[in-house]
Image (tube, rainbow, N blue to C red):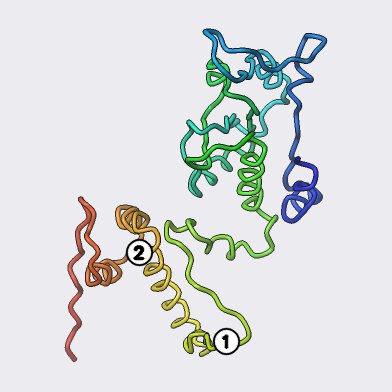
Amino acid sequence: MFAGALDEGLLRVARESGRAEIRLMDLREFTDDPHRTIDDYPFGGGPGMILKVEPVARALDALPPPLAERREVVILTPQGETLTQPLVRKLLEARDVVLLFGRYKGLDERIRVLATREVSLGDFILSGGEPAALVLTDALVRLVPGVMGDIESAEGDSFERTLLDSAYYTRPDVFRGLEVPELLRSGHHGKVAEWRRRDAIERTLRRRPELIDRAAREGSLSGDELRWLVERGWTLPEGVNLPPQKRRRRR
């Protein structure tokens, strides 16, 4: 399941350039029975199989020393904190991240003691943790310095600055009657930047209003932007106040 994904795109670039090392570990290699058993029936009965604690502990013990001062051991589970871009950046600070997952009903509760955190991709269930591990691996590796050719492109993506990204267009200028906004073709970089910022705010308000509230609490919206939102019916979150409007000097 991993071979194809790890040999494509930025994951391949990161591995071949030596900027990131991705190691796969099979828990069956850390068992001590002839059948290489890594799961068992739950105490107390019930359906499904439970990931055993011994193979997980042995695999973690077999890891080389951490690359930095700390190592993040992440369990991918529906019970974890929801994965966000700030969390991706926080994990990346460790430089050494272990992703632990299973393909079972659940895991032995004692495994949680071995981890530093639990992460979920969202409120849905997968048949196994492999897709989730690939998603998080891609999110981490693309931010490793030197992996992306244009880091400014990554820093402008949705969620990097809390807001969703703005709309983008490319040639042709007109497609089936749909025309690219004239301002974006003006060549005026300052006005284009203003248009994209306003479009990002408006798009976020329309599609993910809770992100606007978060941006306001974080202080990442200017006073003019807050006033613009209020004029469109948005309600200031509790604890957020409009800064006084600057008076223009008369000449």
| Residue 233 falls in image quadrant | bottom left
Residue 217, position as x, y percentages in the image: 30, 53
**C-alpha distance separating marks 1 and 2:** 28 Å
In the foreground, 137 or 20 = 137
What numbered label is drawn on residue 198?
none
Q: Look at the image and tell me whether residue 105 can be seen.
A: yes
Q: In this view, does 205 lie to the left or right of 94?
A: left
Do tag 1 and tag 2 residues touch (Cβ < 8 Å)? Answer: no
Name the kind of residue labelled 2 in the image.
Answer: Leu
Q: In the figure, 185 relative to 81: above or below?
A: below
Q: Around disc 2, counting alpha carbons within 10 Å, would you say few (fewer than 14), some (14 to 19), or many (20 or more)?
A: some
| Residue 244 falls in image quadrant | bottom left
Split into 4 quadrants, where in the image is the C terminus? Answer: bottom left
What numbered label is drawn on residue 176?
1
Residue 23, position as x, y percentages in the image: 75, 35
Q: Is residue 222 left or right of residue 125?
A: left
Q: Residue at x 30, y 69 (%)?
A: 225
Helix, strand or loop at label 1? It is loop
Q: In this view, does 88 lie to the left or right of 247?
A: right
Residue 124, position as x, y percentages in the image: 51, 40
- Number of numbered tags placed on the structure image: 2
Name the kind of residue labelled 1 in the image.
Answer: Arg
Split into 4 quadrants, where in the image is the N terminus? Answer: top right
Q: Which residue is drawn at 75% across and 33% down?
A: 24
Name the residue carrying label 2.
205
Helix, strand or loop at label 2? It is helix
Reading the chain from its start, which is encountered first: label 1 or label 2? 1
Q: In the figure, 170 relative to 216: above or below?
A: below
